[in-house]
Image (tube, rainbow, N blue to C red):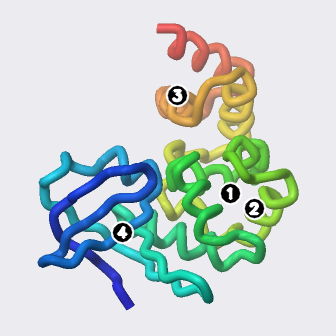
């Protein structure tokens, strides 16, 4: 029903923002990835939205990019995942990180998000496989089993998704697992 809002940003109280559109104030819940990229209060902003009607409320969720909104829509289709949980997932990890976790079937990365347990993470991986994958813009372009192993090793060592993906991009495409890990660790140490 309401697909996009453009107006003046009146208030920013995470995860909610108040948007004035020609005299009408809309309360919009946004993921933290969108929240951090909002302009200052008083500036104009445009958000793509998802309108959800429940028995006890009518809620608007806003997103900076079409991929965020599409990921949200796919998440709320899953049994046991409501809008709040979907917003929490998108706040805890970017769309690219989520897509990468689904592509690599890494439940451990999803469990790190508050409110997501092991069973929910496994259900997310199962139901989103093929729907939300590398096509949604994963950070690292994983092209071989060796690169998957290197990426998982870096994540296991405590590096975050962005650091691991950046180190993986810098590696030669035909590198072996042990050499790749060594090279990646050298690059990350700089």
Residue 114 or 74: which is nearer the viewer?
Answer: 114
Query: Label 4 vs label 3: CA separation?
Result: 35 Å
State yes or no: discs 1 and 2 in contact (Cβ < 8 Å). yes
Is tag 4's residue or tag 3's residue first in the polypeptide sequence? Answer: 4
State yes or no: discs 2 and 4 in contact (Cβ < 8 Å). no
Q: What secondary structure is found at the residue carrying circle 1?
A: helix
Query: Label 1 vs label 3: CA separation?
Result: 18 Å
Most distant residue in the front direction: 56
The residue mark sitting in front, 2 or 4, is 4
Left or right: 5 in relation to 165: left
Q: What secondary structure is found at the residue carrying circle 2?
A: helix
Badge 2 crowding class, 10 Å Cα cut-off, few under 14, some 14 to 19, many 20 or more, is: many
Query: Label 3 vs label 2: CA separation?
Result: 23 Å
The location of residue 38, given as percent across then percent down, is 27, 51
Find residue 24 and name its label: none
Question: Which quadrant would residue 150 be assigned to in this image?
Answer: top right
């Amino acid at each position: 029903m309401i697909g996009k809002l453009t107006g003046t940003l009146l208030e920013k109280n995470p995860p909610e923002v108040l948007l004035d559109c020609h005299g009408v104030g809309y309360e919009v819940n946004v993921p933290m990835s969108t929240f951090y990229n909002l302009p200052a209060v008083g500036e104009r902003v445009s958000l793509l939205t998802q309108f959800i009607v429940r028995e006890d409320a009518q809620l608007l969720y806003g997103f900076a990019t079409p991929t965020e909104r599409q990921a949200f829509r796919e998440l709320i289709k899953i049994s046991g995942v409501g809008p709040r949980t979907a917003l929490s997932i998108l706040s805890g990890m970017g769309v690219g990180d989520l897509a990468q976790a689904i592509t690599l079937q890494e439940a451990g990365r999803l469990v790190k998000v508050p409110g997501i347990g092991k069973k929910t993470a496994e259900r997310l991986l199962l139901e989103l496989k093929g729907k939300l994958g590398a096509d949604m813009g994963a950070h690292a372009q994983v092209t071989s089993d060796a690169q998957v192993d290197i990426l998982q090793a870096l994540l296991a060592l405590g590096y975050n998704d962005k650091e691991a993906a950046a180190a993986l991009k810098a590696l030669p495409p035909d590198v072996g697992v042990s050499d790749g890990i060594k090279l990646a660790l050298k690059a990350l140490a700089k």
